[in-house]
Image (cartoon, grey):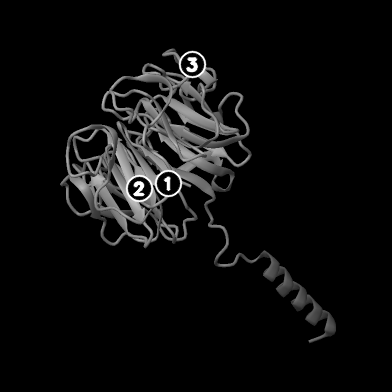
Amino acid sequence: MTYAHVRAVVATLALAALTAVPAHAEPRDPWVRAWGANGAGQLGNGTTLVQQTPADVQGLARAGVRELAGGGWTDSSAFAVALMNDGTVQAWGGNSKGQLGDGTTTDRFFPAAVAGLSGVSQVAAGYHFGYAVRGGRVLAWGDNAYGQLGDGSTTGTNRPVAVQSLNRVADIAAGCYHAVALREDGTVWTWGQNNSGQLGLGSNDNRNTPQRVPGLTDVVEVAAGCNHSLARTADGTVKAWGYNTNGQLGNDSTAPSSVPVDVQHLDDVARIFACAYHSFAVLDDGAVRAWGWNGRGQLGDGSTVSRTTPVPVPALTDVLGLAGGYSHTVAVLADGSVLGWGENDTGQLGDASTTNSVTPVVALPPGSGATRVAASTVGRSSYAY
């Protein structure tokens, strides 16, 4: 072989080394994925067709999304809100109450900007409304029938308005018609509908401005189900309040509570997740506990028996995130796999079927690149990103 040939071979090998994709590189599909019910275009794929396996949300790359929240109840009202890494917010799906925040009430089948939002750090979505935290203050838009926009009125708006008298907000969660906000000082503030005591204020009166939940201090995480609320404290215990017909409060009863109560038999909690009518806790050792309504197997414990105190979810480990809608749950594991369990009538488990499952089935395999999941508040749509 001549010197020229040797140089040609070396150059070819060098080029191949530069262009080859290593085994640990970005997966071939970089997009946010969505599946399940899609009557309002909430899957963001340009159609209103049910999707039984994960499909791309058009033009929304995982790498650009900081947080995604699913909202809505009926299939015709569901929507999604995505916080981008640049601090702007995109929304799509149903918009009958202005829940997309774009100044209209027109449904959108693709992501579009929420009007005038930048510098946002967190988002949340309820039944027909959305929230964004910017500079420690909360902005809200959409339906306001119960004061859930927190602006002192019950008048809805299709553009963001400021929630009154609340600053230094570190995180926010949205229920069906109420909000739970965590301030930097570890206190919890709530507003909106309160028919089941979900505001934790010791009464059942709706509030259209934020109120501090008495007796809660050193809180580090909050979550909201449809009509119940959760708070995790710095010592790893969990408080709950509100609706409890199916054991959502985890206190071995089915009586509602308008003040925080202890979730029983639960210590060393690292994360909490509230779904519509059921909840999960991930412990420090990676184990998962579930409680609440289980009529479709959404607790993942192999049964359809509702649980009034937390029970183990077998064989579920290395969980990065959990989310759930009306009667299904999705989870993402450390290996990138996405699992689903519970009701599956519109393909919300993502396993190419419409068969319910009381134990986890695979929606996305290991190596998918997903690290987080979301679901419509009380709906049948799922997201992975």
The image position of residue 55, as x and y in percent, is 44, 44
> In terms of depth relative to the viewer, which is nearer, 362 or 238?
238
Q: Is residue 96 above or below residue 175?
A: above
Per the model, the C-alpha gap separating discs 1 and 3 is: 28 Å
Inter-mark Cα distance, 3 to 2: 31 Å
Q: Is residue 63 left or right of residue 47?
A: right
Which x, y percent locates residue 28? 54, 55
The nearer-to-camera label among 3 and 2 is 3
Q: Is residue 25 left or right of residue 245?
A: right
Q: Quadrant of the N terminus?
A: bottom right
Residue at disc 1, secondary structure: strand
Q: Which residue is mark 3?
A: 157
Indicate the amino acid at tag 3. Thr
- Which disc is residue 373 wearing? 1
Image location (x, y in percent) of residue 280: 31, 48
Residue lying at the far front of the rendered structure? 215
Look at the image and tell me whether residue 323 can be seen.
Answer: no
Counting from the top left corner in percent of width and height, residue 355 is at 23, 46
Residue indicated by mark 2: 330
Q: Are marks 1 and 2 in contact (CB under 8 Å)?
A: yes
